Image: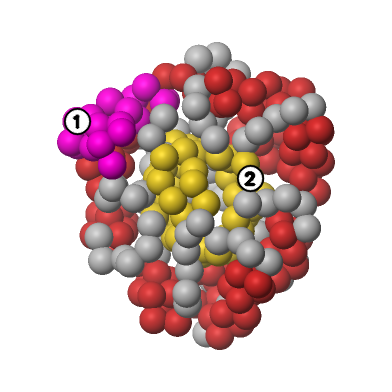
Amino acid sequence: METVRLGNLEVSRFILGGNPLSGFSHWSGAMDEEMKHYYTCARIKALYRQAEQLGITTHLARADHHIIRVLTEYWDEGGTIQWIAQTCPEVGTPDRGALNGIRNRAKAVYLHGGQMDNYWIHGRLDEIPPVIDMIHDAGLPAGVAGHTPEVFEWAEEHLDCDFYMCSHYNSVPRDRTPENIAVAEEVFDDADRERMAAAIQQLSRPVIHYKIMAGGRNEPRAAFRYAASKMRPGDAVCVGIYPKHRPDELAEDVRMFEEGLSAAGQVAGAG
């Protein structure tokens, strides 16, 4: 599988996402609960091993105690996937989440998109540079996520990041809380996707595209083709997997992503 670099870290261009493993479906509260019950530790580790076999070298997941525990078991059993740690609001402040990643074998750390959106709304982004410095001081690539282009416009001026996590959709308001709270209906507006896609072209750092499926609302092949058409040569994609009803979902997604890259003129190995 083709790889790209986030600072000094080489990652597979298809990155395995972590939201479903922690019960975040972006579909409904009922689906959140279904995912929590489906994803036992054994099934998560089996997914990691399947990803390895498909050439996926990198997993992006929350820096919470659940994920840290599963990854520790998986690595102790010989697993090789490297972890990009995402801070998470329920654990605490961004620096607390970053420390969870730093202290538990993460290969890179980035700040949660909901936290960045919330800090931007409330004028608190001046608290972010010291966290980026802390990650760099630990010798790790550092990044920020967000659901609105304004977050990245600010980051370009005020941060020295190694990569950005850009959501294709801004489905939930983050003014009251940075946490992802299941709501009656999340709104996935393609106008948001177009705004973010245009903003990405102006960014100076590699971008990991995420939420490309709109929480399962977009047809997968079309979603991958769209993402690939907007990806620059150094960009990657992050996709969460829920194979309860589609056992071959991960392999199918990798194939569709590579087909999308080919259609966009970015053939694997061509750089």
Left or right of 130 on screen, residue 201: left
Residue at image x 74%, y 43%?
67
Residue drawn at (68%, 21%) of the image:
46
* Label 1: element kind: helix
Picture layout, residue 65 above or below residue 225: below
Q: Is residue 148 left or right of residue 122?
A: left
Between discs 2 and 1, the one toward the N terminus? 2
Where residue 112 sits: x, y (%)? 58, 60
Residue 265 lies within the magenta run = yes
The stretch in magenta equals 253-271
CB atoms of marks 2 and 1 within 8 Å = no
Please state which of residues 161 and 37 is positioned toward the viewer in this rendering.
Answer: 161
Amino acid found under the numbered disc labelled 1: Ala
Q: Which of 127 and 58 is in front in this view?
A: 58
Q: Which amino acid does label 2 sit on?
A: Trp
Q: Which of 94 and 106 is in front in this view?
A: 106
Crowdedness of circle 2 by 10 Å Cα count: few (<14), some, many (20+)? many
Q: Is residue 193 visible to us here?
A: yes
Q: Can residue 177 be seen here? A: no
Q: Which residue is drawn at 62% across and 35% down?
A: 81
- Disc on res. 83: 2
Q: Residue 164: where, in percent of width, then height?
A: 44, 60
Element under disc 2: strand
Residue 249 forms part of the magenta stretch: no
| Residue 263, label in figure | 1
Q: Distance between the residues labelled 2 and 1?
A: 29 Å
Q: In which quarter of the image is residue 66?
A: top right
Give percent across and percent down for residue 192.
32, 56
